[in-house]
Each structure stands twice: as C-alpha cells, then as structure tokens.
Amino acid sequence: MNNPFFKISTSRKIVTLLGLFLGFILLLLDNQATVLALPVATNEIGGLEIYSLSSILGGVGACVAMPVMGFIGARNPGKKNRIYLIGMVICAIVCLINGMATNMFAIVIPKLFLGIGCSVIYGLGYLVIYDLFEGKTLGTVLGIAATITSLAMVVSSIIMGFVTDTWGWRACFYVQIPLYLLAGLLTFFGTRISSEEAAQLKNSEGSIDGFGTFAVFLLIGGLLPAISLNASYAPLGSMPSNLLLIAALVGLILLIVDVRQKRERAIVPMNVLKDKNTLCFTFNSLFNGCATMAVMFFLPLYVMNVMGKSATEAGLITTFSGVFGLFLGPFIGRIIANKGSARWTLIVSIVSNIILHILLIVLLGPSLPIIVIYMLMLLRSLTNVLQSLGQSTGVNIHIEPDKVPYANSLVQLMGNFGPNFAISLFTVILMSGPIADNINLAFIISLIFGAVSLPITLLIKKPVK
C-alpha cells in the first residue's frame, strides 16, 4: 500500500511539523505554569491544599481522551489535523479561564478539559510524524522533536519564572493563548490528504467505543482524585473517598467486560493488549512516568519553600533538565534508526534515573548549594532525552504497523497516568508534614518505580521487520 503522506511537498510537511513542535513546547509551558505560577497564586486566591489537583484532573482528561485519539488515528487518518485544531482551541479557552480565576477551583476544574485538548499533542502528534516519514528520516525527525522538547524545557522554565516574578501568575496563562491557536492553525493548514487517499490508510472500521471510554473515565477519574485528596477533602474512609474508590472499581470492572466482549472493537483492542512489546512499552511508560515526578514537580517547590530561592531559580531546575537534549536528540534518533532497536536506549535511561535519585537522597538538604542541584539535573537531562526517544521511536520500530496507533495511545495514556498517579501519591506524603522531612521518602518511592521498570524493559523483543 502506498502512503499518500510520503508524496506531499516538503514545505507542507515543515508547516505541519512547526505546529506539532509548538504543541510539544506548550505542554512544558503549561507544566511550568503549574509548577511555578500556582504556588504563587495560592497567596492571592488560596487553595494550597488542592492546587496539585490541577495536574491530576488534567491527567484524567488526557488519559480518557488518549484511547479515542488512537481510534481516530487508526480509523480516520485524514482527520487528524482537524482534531488537532479543535484540541488547541479548547486549550486556549481553558488558559483564558485560568488567567481570570478568582479561586483555585476555577483553575483546577477546567484543567480536565485542558487534558482532553492536550491529548491530541501526543495522542495524534506522533502518529502524524509516523505518517509523514519512515526509516532513518523518521529517526532524525523524532530526534529533532526531542531537541525541541529539550529546548522547551530550557526556555519555558526561564520564561515562566520571569513572567511570574515580573507580571504575576495570571500572565503565565495569558501568554499561552495565542500560541495554542497558532499551533492548531499550522497543523490544520499543513499536511492534508483527500478522503479517498485517507481511506487507504484505515486499519479498521466501526464507531468509537463509548462504553469503554466511560469505563476509563470512571477508573482514572475515581482513582487519581481519591489518592490526591486523601490529605484534604477526602480522607481515606470518608464518604467522598469511598465514592471515588467505588467509581474506580466499577470502571475497572466495566473496562474488563468491555475488552472481553468487544475484543478488537474495544477502546483498547484485545490483539493490542496481547502484544508483548506493546505491554512492555506501556508499563515502561507507566513506571518511568511515576519515577520522574518527585524531581519534576516537588523539587522546585523544595527549592522555593525550604531553600528560600526565587521562582526563577527554581525554574532553572527544568532548564538544566533539558541541556543534553538540545544537541543529542537527532544524534540518538539516528542511532536508534540505524540499529533498528530502542531497547538499550530505554535501559540506559532507567539506570541513569536510578543513579540520579540515589544522589539526591544522599546530598539534598537546605544548605546544599543550588549549583549542585543544577549539575544533578544534567544527569536528568540525559535520562529525559533517552526515555523520550526510546519510547517515540520504539513504538514505531518494535510494534506491528497496524497496531501502532492503538499502541501509541496506550503508551501515551500510561505516560499521563503514571506522573499523575505519582503526583497524587506524593501530595499525600508531602501534605502529611513539612516538605523538608518528607521529600526523601518521595525520592525513595521514585527510585522503586524506576527499579521496577528495568526488568520490564529487558523483556522487549527484537523489532518488527
């Protein structure tokens, strides 16, 4: 089968890539708005005990929408650019509401819809790249994507730290609005194919599995808030907590029933769940997502609240976390493409992340020079670029082509669920006492998550020919 995307002009491909890359940047801008701006916002509008729930609800929205993105990618390949534009418009509206918020609930609740909007960035973004390129060129483009993401880590933390310190926390949301709209328009007017050409690329037929989507919503929408609110509004054993956990259990049961009955027509098809490599990449994404969040989400908070540093200085943690990705991305991408395997890239990423957490547990303290933390974040930058490229290229290399859209959505779903589950868990830990006393426990748990992912990653089989 001829792929019509391969035949379109280079200029149109570049326009689409600009929109997709801007989307990757915006994910990190929004993350920095959460990490740096919301702690400042609590001084004005309150809500310190629930502000981390913004990430949780965003994760719920993204996780629920991610399998739908896989369905769209497999069955409506010609409509991906339209869905991308709609997602970016939703994100822009949420940013407007967040910037005008008068209480923390006006920030937290709309994040559910931001997660739905942002699910197109990873849920469809990588599928578009897989459509446009193949072989070594694909490896190079994915490497460039990793470089762009690393650049975003450097730039977004500096920008959001400066914006917060200079113009206030609301400006962090307002600056994102035109960028979301631009990303959507670039992608929409970039790569397009006719309906006849798109029909050649359909992997299967049928309608969206609404029952399965509802089951995923119940499962994730019950579990993550139940954990996150345990230290505040829904203590374990209380009525709200019990209702959330019951909803999660019902969601799990319904999802199992859905997959067993609908099989290949389920929200996550049975043949995809039976694929060994898909499961390995999925659980690698889950546990590595859990293993990174103590550093990403709570270390900046520690630097500001315990070490007494500014938002800009805390933001530099993310800046240094992207340094190696600035120049190693295309190089590693081509190496993976040449070798035809991403297995050892992921293994090295896991080992370096384990070493990082051991060093933080041993060294971190209120009097530790901030420059030492920045240097440790260079090791994290190596972990980030290896993990990002290992997953993005590995899904395309190690998994059969007809399963890639669903496998990618499953990997991205767990990539969203893992960090948000970890944030929920760590929030309970850190709310139980001073952050200075409990952050090492969060690092130890992260270390365990990383260690669990190692044997799973070793099980990845040779790539599909």
Image (spheres, rainbow, N blue to C red):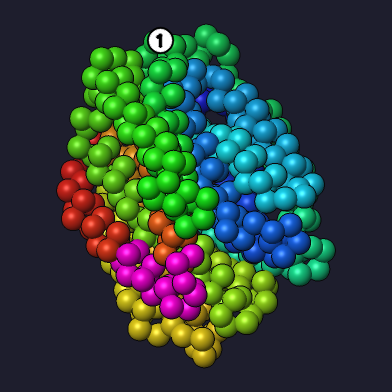
Question: Residue shown at 30%/56% (left/top)?
Answer: 346
Question: Residue shown at 82%/63% (left/top)?
Answer: 167
Residue 350: quarter of image: bottom left
For the question of whether residue 116 can be seen, the reply is: yes
- The residue pinned by badge 1 equals 206
Residue 363: quarter of image: bottom left
| Quadrant, the N terminus | top left
Residue farthest along the right direction in this orientation: 167
Say left or right for 327 vs 459.
Answer: right
Residue 12: quarter of image: top right
SS class, disc 1: loop
Within-10-Å neighbours for mark 1: few <14, some 14–19, many 20+: few
Q: Is 439 within the magenta?
A: yes
Front-lying residue, 410 or 139 = 410
Front-lying residue, 252 or 276 = 252
Q: Which secondary structure class fits the magenta region best?
A: helix
Q: Is residue 224 above or below residue 350?
A: above
Residue stretch in magenta: 431-447
Question: Residue shown at 52%/90% (left/top)?
Answer: 367
